[in-house]
Image (tube, grey):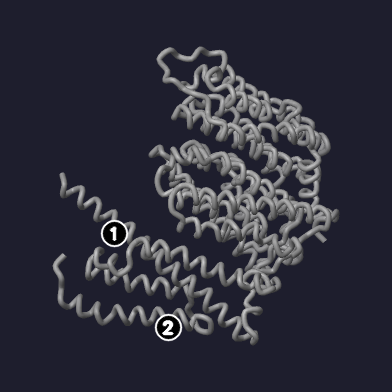
Amino acid sequence: MKRSTILVVVARFLIPLIMLFALYVQFHGEYSPGGGFQAGVLFAAAWILFVFIYGLETGLRVIPTRVIYALASLGVLLYAFIGLLGVVMGGRFLDFYPLLESPHAAQQAGIILVEFGVGITVATVVMLIFLMFAQRRAMTDAAERNE
Amino acid sequence: MNVTEWMPFIVLIPLIAGPICILLPGQRLPWLLAMLSAASALIIAGFTFAEVITNGTLRYAFGNWQPPIGIEYRVDAANAFVALLITGMASIMLAWGKPTVDVEIPERQSSFYALFLLAFAGLLGITLTGDIFNVFVFLEISSLATYALIAHGQDRRALVAAFRYLMMGTVGATFLLIGIGFLYIMTGTLNMMELAERLPALADSRATQVGLAFIVVGFSIKLALFPMHHWLPNAYTYAPSLVTAFLAATATKVALYVLLRFVFTVFAPDYSDAAMPLAIAFAVLAIAGMFAGSWIAIFQKNLKRLLAYSSVAQVGYMVLGASFVTVVGVTASFLHLFNHGLIKGALFMAAGIVFHQIGSARLEDMRGLGRVMPWTLTGFALAGLSLIGIPPTVGFVSKWYLISAAIDAGQTWIVVLILISSLLAVVYIAKLIELFWMQPRPADSPVVQEASPALLIPLWLMVFANFYFGIDTRLTVGGATAAAQAILGVPVGGLP
């Protein structure tokens, strides 16, 4: 693909903005519309735009496939860990009240942490889905060139 | 800590072990983790079952959010009985299946076992939850994991089978979701107990009736009730041996349990019958399934496919018991749910061992195999006797209770139909036994050895269970009776 200057400039401007907006949606999720799922998809969209402009190899140098896989499961495990923390501290699974003294702060902290786990997993899984299609395309292209 | 605090960990342990499993390298560690989590879930399920039988319903509100705001796990004898079956089957299948997985899925075993754990956790979640939307979520977890597991089969046709199941399963799940939506609009709650309280006032509403219809059809697809069984034979035939054995012993059972839970607990039994002729519909479809499944099974040329069609017929027996809408009938249903798990588990394990040794599931490759692999195929034949229902096996106990339920309901003609359809099972099992022992092994066939003890011991454990629970029926009949009373709302230790 020919590299267009307009695309590169616009992308350079947009990618950080999209990421910033993703983080905004992530960390305001507990009292405004948003949350982990939406933030994760936004964040992954920024990476996908990056791959469109700079190519898959550069994109995978930023975040290797193994790291994507690991983060996808670590996000779920963060969620589960916060849930289990409630059990360990004398409550029930996903019970946030025992986490902190003040009940409001405890609920807020619990929700933010759990949603952060959701965000990580959703972002990396969306990246993985994109990666599967992109790599398949690269494989078939290579096979055609060899023929 | 008491049992209530531990009970949700039946679901949580495999659910959390799944993502950990992906991170583990190699072939041994992922299997070990899966095995450990299945075994610990089994232990907790055993304690839960004992507690529920003696002290009645357990309730656990997630995050300490009491229902109707929060999600509640509500375990009575029916859930605990089914959870015991699932965890037991998963433990024994995992203990058995490692060598077959090593051959059939040589690479990326960590993701295979992670998917297995997710499917396992999903089935348990459907079983234990007391929230109808949670049922849908766990149904999707287990279904999506199952589609991927089936697609792991070596044969390329496994992909088509998985895709077909994906299509049918998605239709089923969508129907279920529409039905749940109707109920939520009408009642404003998703909790099963609150629904059961509010629905009688809305008995005449068309929307409630439509909701029930969608839910029944949705689960019937997952249950593979004839004529909605078309996904099942291919899925069971082409999936890896471990997946086939596990699914055959658990997946349709969970669908049956949750269907009964909706029809009998969420909606009252007499309502479900009055709103639409469910009892007659179930009876007709069940009997049609019993005959069609067995009849088609007779003509199959692939061992796993034959057993899959036989499963369609056996689902018929389970639904037939429920169609009487009596405690005895539903007891027969739950009893066969458990017993058929043991029977089909053993049969598919033996089929998996044969596939492992000769690399084929076609019947023509198995001529005279009984002389070469006596241990495997004797186990198969004994489990086959249990499938037919010869005393003292679990199959006999199931049929005995089913027939007494039919007589109890005054429908003696159904007894005749049950006996005739059992004769069809005699035909296909006898055909297999003839093939294994009476026919000579072709001279040009490759050399085959008996399987290793690692595969044979769990198989024989299952075969032994088929006979043990045929003689000592305290656990199975007692559990099934308590389950039927709980699900029908008869006040004996079950629902308050």
Q: Nearer the viewer, residue B184 or B278?
A: B184
In the rendered image, is residue B451 in sight?
Answer: yes
Which residue is situated farthest in the right direction here?
A: B492
**Chain letter for the residue marked with disc 2 in the picture:** A
Q: Is residue A5 above or below residue B391?
A: below
Q: Which residue is labeled 1 in the image?
A: A134
Q: Is residue B458 left or right of residue B146?
A: right
The residue depicted at 66 percent of the width and 54 percent of the height is B127
Q: Which residue is labeled 2 in the image?
A: A24
Gap between marks 2 and 1 measured at Cα = 29 Å
Q: Nearer the viewer, residue B232 or B177?
A: B232
Residue type at numbered disc 1: Ala
Q: Which element carries disc 2, helix, strand or loop?
A: helix
Q: Dot 2 surroundings within 10 Å: few (below 14), some, or many (20 or more)?
A: some
Expressed as whole percent of the image width and height from the top left, the position of residue B14 reads 58, 56
Q: Dot 1 surroundings within 10 Å: few (below 14), some, or many (20 or more)?
A: few
Mark earlier in primary sequence (2, 1): 2
Q: Is residue A16 left or right of residue B95?
A: left
Residue type at numbered disc 2: Tyr
Expressed as whole percent of the image width and height from the top left, the position of residue B481 reads 80, 45
Expressed as whole percent of the image width and height from the top left, the position of residue B325 reads 77, 46
